[in-house]
Image (spheres, rainbow, N blue to C red):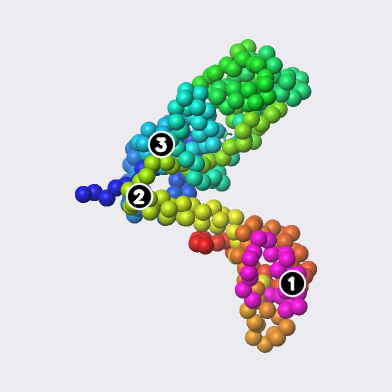
Amino acid sequence: MDEPRLKLAIQKSGRLTDPSLDLLVRCGLKISRGKDQLMAFGENMPLDVLFVRDDDIPDLVQEDVCDLGLVGLNVLEEKRLELAARGHPVRFQQVRNLDFGRCRLSLAVPQGASFEGASSLRGRRIATTYPFLLENYLRERDIEAQIVTLSGAVEIAPRLGRADLICDLVSTGSTLQANHLREVETVLESHAVLIRTPLALAPVKDEWVERLLMRIDGVQQVRESKYIMLHAPRDALPEIRKLLPGSESPTIIPLEGFPDRVAIHAVCRENVFWETLESLKKAGASALLVLPVEKMLA
Ligand code: ATP
Ligand code: ZN
């Protein structure tokens, strides 16, 4: 009998596609994907990748077509509220927050329009592709407004006279600016998440989910981490250790021929900035070297 294989859904083509594939490759997955193919075969893990529209990812896990999915929290939370509104149980679990796909669902008004807090929304028409998140936001603030649900091009709705303001995804704000809109409130801070089915999996699949989670943690830690090496006077050690950002126990190595100096090697779990290096140098450090970390397993 064939070995059971995990199915993971990711966005077919869009903002999450490259960072999702990059994460999987960093986790060691080798996939073969033909052009325009809907599915890629994991060559070195029992894991296949399905390429779909991001909006379909929660449903695919919900309906047990896929075991795992990489999707924006915005899409996931909208789906969760929709299921709740229809009285359906939620059949996906959020298992990891990921460090890509950062954006926020925000309210934006036409430039020049006044806005004095959420109460300014009362009785207004708000265009969005996230009606459930918006409705939830309004309900929590006890505000009645009209939600205009669109399937896209939300940012032009005010100019077309279809809405007074919008509730849409923003990252840099340049799209808003280009459409003469001003961001006024955040409805949801979002980033990509990994979801899984809450159903029990075959032992082989379960084991691979655990391995994948560990590798994802390693990949995410590494992205921020640096390996730092330096020489320092032995008596400056306490000060130097305080300056090393996010490092636990550095390795201290004696230097042949220099009894009062040591070499220090440490993994820093935070980025090492020029300012940190300058402070270290002031504290007596020399021969400073900062290296990227490739893999890490706690
Ligand atoms: P699809 O065809 O898959 O439905 P889409 O148009 O819905 O594509 P994208 O614009 O590629 O999708 O956005 C996918 C996800 O990327 C969003 O749901 C969100 O989680 C994230 N994202 C990050 N930054 C932004 C941004 N500035 N605007 C929109 N989405 C963003
Ligand atoms: Zn979409």
Q: Which residues are magenta?
A: 231-252
Q: Say which residue appears at 44% left-offset and 27% top-offset.
A: 88
Disc 1 from disc 2: Cα separation: 47 Å
Q: Is residue 156 visible?
A: no
Q: Are marks 2 and 3 in contact (CB under 8 Å)?
A: no
Q: Say which residue appears at 37% left-offset and 44% top-offset.
A: 200
Q: Is residue 38 above or below residue 240?
A: above
Q: In the drawing, does residue 105 fall left or right of residue 119?
A: left
Q: Which residue is mark 2?
A: 205
Q: Position of residue 289 (x, y in %)?
A: 64, 68
Q: Earlier in the sequence, mark 1 or mark 3?
A: 3
Q: Is residue 163 above or below residue 37?
A: above
Which-is-in-front pick, marks 1 and 3?
Answer: 3
Image mark for residue 238: 1
Disc 1 from disc 3: Cα separation: 51 Å
Question: What's under tag 1, amino acid-wise?
Answer: Pro
Q: Earlier in the sequence, mark 2 or mark 3?
A: 3
